[in-house]
Image: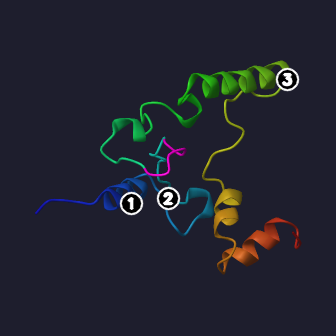
Amino acid sequence: SGKMTNFDLLMHMNSFAGRSYNDLTQYPVFPWIIADYESEEIDLDDPNTYRDLAKPMGGQSESRAKQFREKYREYEEGGMEPAHYGTHYSCAAYVLYYLMRLEPFSRLALRLQGGRF
């Protein structure tokens, strides 16, 4: 029928981008799409339920954008390479953090922490 689920589309995009479950530094990523974390129930037909995918997570609101601009300025003034984000959301440490209750990720997380938590 030529139709594809959102999950399948994102998996194909991750694959085309070279992301794989076989490399913790290139683990597949999925965008955060929900913006409403306050409501008891969310209306999936309401456009305000979803975040603006044209903007990065740090730019979803003016207060968040201000916070990340300030971080950039602090890095710059401190003599560090200026950046809005301190790390990428798909680094190996984050992948291990979210999957540490499953083997082999438990063992790998333990090794990353020098053998102890």
The numbered mark, 3 or 2, whose residue comes first in the sequence reads 2
**Is 16 displayed left or right of 83 in the figure?**
left
Percent from the top left, x then y, of residue 26? 56, 57
Percent from the top left, x then y, of residue 78? 86, 23
**What amino acid is found at the position of numbered circle 1 in the picture?**
Met
Indicate the secondary structure of the residue bearing disc 3.
Answer: loop
Rendered residue at 75%/78% (across/down): 107
Which residues are the magenta region?
A: 36-41
The numbered mark, 1 or 3, whose residue comes first in the sequence reads 1
**What amino acid is found at the position of numbered circle 2 in the picture?**
Pro
**Is 21 displayed left or right of 96 in the figure?**
left
Indicate the secondary structure of the residue bearing disc 1.
Answer: helix
Q: Are the residues at dot 2 and dot 1 in contact (C-beta closer than 8 Å)?
A: yes
Q: Which residue is mark 2?
A: 28
Q: Which residue is mark 3?
A: 79
Q: CA distance from mark 1 to mark 3?
A: 39 Å
Q: Which residue is mark 1?
A: 11
Rendered residue at 67%/35% (across/down): 85
Question: Does residue 6 lie above or below 103 as drawn?
Answer: above
Q: CA distance from mark 2 to mark 1?
A: 7 Å
